[in-house]
Amino acid sequence: MQTKKIELLETYLSLYIDHMTVLNSIKKADSPYVILDVRNAPAQVKKEQIKGAIAMPAKDLANHLDELNKDKIYVVYDWTGGTTLGKMALLTLLSADFQAFELAGALEGWKGMNLPMETL
Amino acid sequence: MQTKKIELLETYLSLYIDHMTVLNSIKKADSPYVILDVRNAPAQVKKEQIKGAIAMPAKDLANHLDELNKDKIYVVYDWTGGTTLGKMALLTLLSADFQAFELAGALEGWKGMNLPMETL
Amino acid sequence: MQTKKIELLETYLSLYIDHMTVLNSIKKADSPYVILDVRNAPAQVKKEQIKGAIAMPAKDLANHLDELNKDKIYVVYDWTGGTTLGKMALLTLLSADFQAFELAGALEGWKGMNLPMETL
């Protein structure tokens, strides 16, 4: 069982990227990371987003894959880490052979650490 | 690793059902879905629940399987998506050969979208 | 798919230990459980912790494994169940052949049930 646990944890954790890795990279001009806000809510409900994120609702993602770039690394996030929307978006991206991660802790964690946000 | 990630995401996401699928179905007379509130708390702590849900605390579920119907599809939820109670109930149901899903986003997500609730 | 779901749920749930098992044991003098608070935050941000927990930030854990005891069972927790820090710490511990679990529901769930806390 120990081996199964370790394998599950390794694969599960490999789906995620942490806040600081993303934040430190996107400050640079040539960052490979692109943050996708995959919340399925209109701007007036979302009110704000992670600074520099692109709004790409999970429900529309499959129809916009031709706008994405295989040289980039996509970082998706939803409201909290307890939802499944980020993982749905991630599955769509990985299945289409894009490089992608879910943001660990999601928007809630990013805000909780007072990282840069912007108003919508 | 990409294949392992995709397999994990596919299996993980197959455990869940989304709010709107459930909500649209339970409005109809012949809905196959039955919502089970598996929180292990008394009514005065829960205060409210998803409209039409049946209280079936996870700790009691194994002793009530004979009251369930194999033609129905059970949708379990706990307070938030970050707990394990829903998955424990789901394992009990699937292992007993019932059709069952965990509600994506749990009670927190349902309330966050202002979907129908009822007072206990 | 049903078999895959059950296997995933079994392995996933085997990573966790529930509040009451831990609480009932740590009241006794010879409890095998040791609670590790793996939040990467300073005490003034954390403000309080689970009573009797040892502060062991996930980022430092790998350098402190020689202080741990293979006869103990380590219980790690982060702020909420939606983060990945607990699972990162768990992977470090299991990979080093320690007995360890993540606390189901994390700090949020423990506090939500009004279980014993202490100020930092």
Image (spheres, coloured by chain):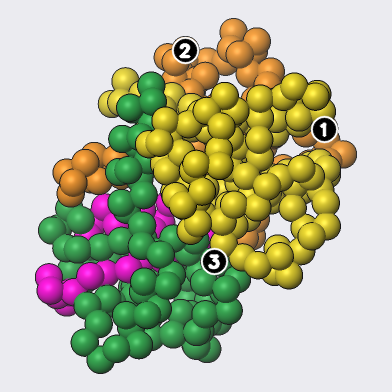
Chain colours: A orange, B yellow, C green
In the structure shown, which secondary structural element does the residue marked by tag 3 occupy? helix
Return the x and y of residue B8 as percentages of the image width and height: 37, 29
Q: Nearer the viewer, residue A42 or A85?
A: A85
- What residue type is disc 1 on? Pro
Q: Quadrant of residue A66?
A: top right
Return the x and y of residue B61 as percentages of the image width and height: 50, 51
Location of mark 1 (residue): A42
Q: Which residues are magenta?
A: C67-93
Q: Chain of mark 3?
A: C
Q: Chain of mark 2?
A: A
Q: Residue furthest top?
A: A66
Q: Which mark is residue C109?
A: 3
Q: Nearer the viewer, residue C22 or B28?
A: B28
Identity of the residue drawn at 63% across and 18% down: A61
Packing grade of label 1 (10 A; few <14, some 14-19, many >=20) is few
Alpha carbon distance from label 3 to label 1: 30 Å
Packing grade of label 3 (10 A; few <14, some 14-19, many >=20) is many
In the structure shown, which secondary structural element does the residue marked by tag 1 occupy? loop
Q: Which mark is residue B47?
A: none
**Residue C69 highlighted magenta (yes or no):** yes
Are the numbered discs 3 and 1 placed on the same chain, yes or no? no
Q: Is residue C79 above or below residue C14?
A: below
Q: Residue furthest bottom?
A: C29
Q: Is residue C82 visible?
A: no
